[in-house]
Amino acid sequence: MAVIGRIRQRSTLLIVVIGVALAAFILGDFFKRGGRQEANIGVIAGEKISVIDFNNRVERVVEMREKSSGERLNADDLFNIKQTTWNEYVQDLLMGSEYKALGLVVSKDELNDLIRGKDPHPYIKQNFSNPQTGEFNAQQVGMFLDNLNNPSIVSPDMRNNYLYLEGLIKKDRIQTKYFNLLSQGYYIPSAFSKADYEAKNKMVKYQFVAANYKSIPDSSVSLSQADYEKFYKENKYRYKQDKSRDIEYVVFNVRPTQEDRNELQRMINELYKEFQESQNIPNFVNAVSDQRYDSSWLKPSQLPVMMASKVKTATKGSYVAPYFANNAFHFAKIMNVMNRPDSMKATHILVSYKGAYGADTSVSRSREEAQRLADSLMKVAKRRPSQMGTLATNFSNDPSAKTNKGDLGWFKDGTMVPTFNNFVFTNKKGTIGVTETPFGFHVVRVDDKSKEEEKIRLAEVTRKLTPSDETYQAKFLEASDFATKNPDNASFNKAITEAGYNKRTSERLTPMVNKIPGLAYSRNVVQWAFLDKTNVGDVSQVFSFEDHYVVASLKATHDEEYQQLKDIKENIKPLVVREKKAEILLDKVNSALATTSNLEALAKALNTTVETVEDGSFSSPNIPGYGREPEVVGTIFSMTPGEKSNAIKGTQAIYVLQLDNVKEAGKKNDFSREATAMANQFRVRIRRDAPKAIEKANHIDDNRYLYY
């Protein structure tokens, strides 16, 4: 097992290298920040949020999530948890002060009712429901809470998770009270509801002449700097911005070399020899393969094309020699060949016991008692096979048995736990017997099987071709050399051109952006761009990613409250052109109005036509063919029949209107329906806008980008 030994040695070395690098990172970060008097991640309404407190709260959530899922969280998950934690701090501190000022609390009795009452909080229903049936178990809630302080029944982790859940319930309840209070703290005056009714039901007929901006080609419009400055001054409020950065960067991709492939080929050849001599194939696969041993029975059609072609005529005990496909080397052994059904059908009665996997807390019988009960049920079922469903309904600990009478229906070969699957496979249709799984004892009746097909059990070793340590080091040195020799943006760009590298640009990066396009988790690059010591034109150190290195240069900073004209000049050009056209057409229309007395003559002078709107509505400020024109439509509703307007500057044209007639809204005294609709709209806005308004009214120093 020489090759396996070398693999283990390299793994140990890798762990040591990673450990040293991690320690250096942590200590470096510690010493770098050690001189800070304040280690605050932010200040919310005067309340300082220490990094330690913030990290402790994050770690609690991470621990719960990882224990719940059984998996390590990735970088994106961790970042999202940190973002959520910050938002919780903002909400807790800002809204908490609001709740306190209003005297809003959740009493012990009220909380108890939300948890144990007749209509528990949705969080309780969600966490104490059967995952298979979705049925809520109130009894389970009571038993859990009665044993909350008994560590032999409720583990510390479970207790902590519950207390966290309880906190969420209290938070949700007090928030509901707050929004209910706000939503009831106003009324809709009858004048408002009447106006709303009239806006929707009062109709006007009017004619208009429009000098469309499209009548002037963009190419014929000449713009001066003064035109841009005038537009910018009038519309500057529209261009408020968050602090941001523009960067340029080069990606040095690490790809396996031919030497890497040759070295892996040599290792694969040695492993294949050891594989053929191994007395424990599953353990061998688990020790050296990128994928663990899989004992599933597969049809050749379920295998990758290359492997399927190689096992087509293979027999039990034969080997598949090494081959390269999908960027990996593969070899395998045919562990077994057998005719098996693709699907099977069975009915079962689960008899669980205390300590069995997934057993309900109400199950108190021992394993021996469960086995005796299962044997008794089996005897009854054998005497009366037709009563299997009734027995399942009355005795099974599988919650779904109440609705399906223990009928599992058709299931794919291999999808059930091995002992259960094997029992159904090895026994004939109609057989009734007992088998044990981690869930307990099962009284099983084999109901049916599909036609048997040839399947194989394959032990496959897969080793993906990846860059070697030497290849990574060579590419790192290339990137490092590039960064060292080109310390400013000018040399950075010159070197890119000379070396033929592909320069990428990412603009308007905000402090808490998680990913840069084309880069996976790239928070470290963003943090560098926002450091006080990073100046425009600076070139970064080398940033390491999973399969590439990055060197970046800070191209521009945007720290002003509003975007600068020079930065948005190209973006606003179409709008400035439109303003210029409006000026030209407004003069033209006013000149024509001075020499004409009606719309027909005006239209002729402007080389256009008179258009008519039959049913104009104040609540729908659109002009057919032109789109949304609220100022224009608003003007028509301020006019009297027969009146002609002056020239009006709209979004798409210069308009002259003439009101023909008005169809008043129907007589009505009760506007409660309109008031209710307006109130409902207001309630929706309260939930959405109230927290934003409170946050805007308070000062928040957000220093998160310095820490993660």
Image (spheres, helix red, strand yellow):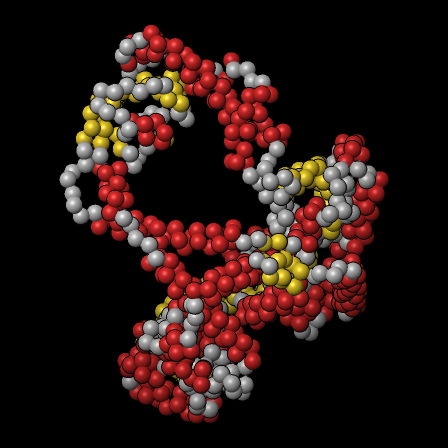
Considering only vertical position in the picture, is 621 above or below 382?
A: above
User: What residue sits 16% from the left and 45% below the top?
Assistant: 669
Residue 267 can be seen in this image: no
Q: Residue at x 79, y 37 (%)?
A: 488
Left or right of 552 in this view: 395: left
Residue found 52% across the figure and 79% down from its top: 159
In the rendering, at what x and y percent does residue 324 appear? 67, 52
Where does residue 696 sit, x and y in percent of width and height?
52, 50
Question: Going by the image, does 492 lie left or right of 162?
Answer: right
The quarter of the picture where residue 478 lies is top right
- Who is closer to the viewer here, 252 or 490? 490
Q: Position of residue 618 (x, y in %)?
A: 29, 34
Between residues 306 and 391, which one lies in front from this camera angle?
391
Relative to 358, does residue 615 appear above or below in the rendering?
Answer: above
Q: Residue at x 33, y 73 (%)?
A: 119
Nearest the camera: 226 or 86? 226
Q: Is residue 176 left or right of residue 325?
A: left
Q: Horizontal placement of 155 versus 530: left or right? A: left
Q: Position of residue 276 (x, y in %)?
A: 70, 67
